[in-house]
Amino acid sequence: MRLVIFDLDDTLVVEQASAEAAFLETCELAKARYGIDPQTLHSTVRETCRTFWHRSPARAYCLAIGISSWEGLWARFAGNDENLELLRDWAPTYRRNSWYEALRKHGVDDETFAVRLAEEFAANRSKRHVVYDDVPAVLKSLKQSYGLGLLTNGVPDMQREKIDAAGIGVYFDEIVISGEVGVGKPNPQIYEIILSRFGVPPNEAVMIGDSLRSDVKGAQAVGVKAVWLNRLKESRDDTIIPDFEVSNLKELKEAFEQSASPGVEPAVRLTRQRALPSGRRE
């Protein structure tokens, strides 16, 4: 094995929990002004933003590169791509409407306050770029023996901000962001792009990520072995079977050793369990 490819969100950096914390901090403002329960408003705005997100003028692009509705609430959509320009022009309306409609569902008709909440959420999310505790040491160790690649879905400026703020960009020889190449995981094309940049055949690479659909199934479709990083110890069925399953990055060393030894069982045994949703992006 010559190449190790990592996913970014909820593999190296904390995404869903960071977004939730930013939502709740923002919703505290609504509690202070109008007495709305923050957790309840959080759930409501997640519903309203999904509804408006499906009406995006660049819907096909968003689906192709894998942008979630909550990411659309804080991404700047910087860049010259015509789809990014459409999203950049539309984003202020999307954010205002998402928060305004959520407030209205709780009996509050205050568009000015909705705009404030939209701005506060973007600021609150932008200040939260946290890596998991096991990330720096594992990346530093792997870099001594393998080429390291980062393969992530999302808006270019937003993903670059996460990478830079988390301080992990220095570990990677190549970084491929779906929004920069126009196609995202699990499309085999994006895996072929990163393999070509390293000049490495599929059988000499391994993909590590938290999504069974995007990271495991996508990688295996082009012949790359896949490690499912199951930090939350969720269950699954055998619809998608990773080559290895680990609960943290420190277990990768054992998984790689097992992979290099023919006839040896995977580092973490996989059991037949219930299915998970195919993806977490909204």
Image: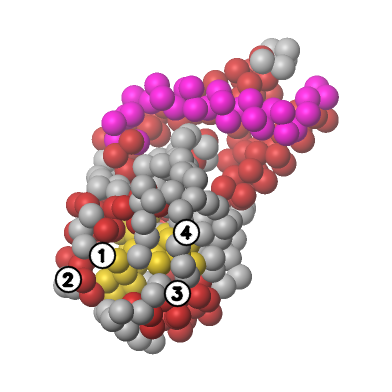
For the residue marked with disc 3, what is the amino acid? Ala
Is 168 inside the magenta-drawn segment? no
**Residue beneath disc 1:** 224
Residue bounds of the magenta highlight:
33-62
- Determine the main secondary structure of the stretch shown in magenta: helix
Q: CA–CA distance between discs 2 and 4?
A: 30 Å
Q: Quadrant of the N terminus?
A: bottom left
- Whole-angstrom CA distance, mark 2 to mark 1, is 9 Å
Judged left or right of residue 3, residue 77 is right
Image depth: mark 4 or mark 3 in front: 4
If you read the primary sequence from the N terminus, does the residue marked by circle 2 or circle 4 appear first? 2
**In the rendered image, which residue does mark 3 sit on?**
267
Total marks placed: 4
Residue 143 visible at all? no
Real-space Cα distance between discs 2 and 3? Answer: 24 Å
Q: Earlier in the sequence, mark 2 or mark 1?
A: 2
- Name the residue rendered at 29%, 35% in the picture: 61
Residue indicated by mark 4: 271
Asked if labels 3 and 4 touch by Cβ distance under 8 angstroms, the answer is: no
Residue 201, disc: 2
Secondary structure of residue under mark 4: loop
Instruction: For label 2, count other residues whose C-alpha is less than 10 Å away and answer few (under 14), some (14-19) or many (20+).
Output: some
Q: Is residue 197 above or below residue 107?
A: below
Using a 10 Å C-alpha cutoff, classify the residue at mark 4 as few (fewer than 14 neighbours), some (14 to 19) or many (20 or more).
Answer: few
Mark 2 vs mark 4: in front? 4
Amino acid type indicated by mark 1: Val
